[in-house]
Image (spheres, grey):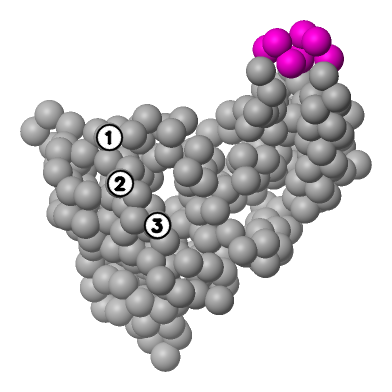
Amino acid sequence: MQGAAALSVEGLTIRFGGLTAVDNVSFEVREGEVLSLIGPNGAGKTTAFNAITGYVEAASGEIRYRGVRLTGLAPHAIAALGVVRTFQKTSVFAGQTVHANVAIGLHLRSRQTPLAILLGLPSVAREERQLEREAEEVLRLVGLEARSGDLAASLPYGELRLLEVAVALAARPKLLLLDEPVSGMNPAETGSFMRLLARIRAQGITVLLVEHDMKMVMGVSDRIICLNQGRIIATGTPAEIQGNPEVVRAYLGERYLHKGA
């Protein structure tokens, strides 16, 4: 169920030298929704993602997650609050197994001290069993349980992207930011990813999505924001966005005009 704002972005401006990549952008992501950012290449979508997750510094503006100020925090501190992202390019360990990649993500949440591990305290064994169960659950959720023992390098591209999402899910996100997750996928793989997104949402995870595949965007989004040249030009439901003349001119093309009406 959608509710109050999970993420609030107010007056976000990002500059690289003399270039303003994001220009006074304000929006919010509501609890439980799938919100998509769309727009032409260079519109500022990924740059906004990078600011939200601490990878670039904003020139001005405020970013808050559930009331906590994110502006100025390091990426690991933001992730610890439950704001987790994927990247346009896969970022898994190719030489490790599928299971090991997820386990690495899980162990970043370990509460055990080096001394407890060295002494082999019972709490260490209990946590290991719990993390093992969680790894199996995550792989089952993304549909990679049968690939658990395979090297990540052996996975086809579509499954590699699923593994990246699995690693992100291992961090127990409350807000998951997906940056072009189906880029390079074929239609069957994209359809599978759309079904995965529905399962992720059923877990109570809020999603902020950047994607160019409009069939996916229109099929999974509650609301859509269109950016152009660093500014928001429209916000609305999929039907409203498809029928918005300014969005059609800037990005979608004439085939979308009034399609959703």
Residue position for label 1? 72
Task: Confirm or deny contact between disc 1 and disc 2 (CB under 8 A).
Answer: yes
Spot occupied by residue 125 in the image (x, y as percentages of width and height): 85, 26
Q: Nearer the viewer, residue 226 or 133?
A: 133
Mark 1 and mark 3: Cα distance apart in space: 16 Å
- Residue under the point 89% across and 29% down: 149
In the rendered image, the vertical position of residue 125 relative to residue 255, given as above or below: above
Q: Which residues are magenta?
A: 114-120
Q: Amino acid at mark 3?
A: Arg
Res 66 label: 3
Q: Is residue 116 magenta?
A: yes
**Residue 176 x %, y %:** 53, 51
Q: Are marks 3 and 2 in contact (CB under 8 Å)?
A: no
Q: Quadrant of residue 219?
A: bottom right
Disc ID at residue 69: 2
Considering the whole magenta stretch, tell me its main secondary structure.
Answer: helix
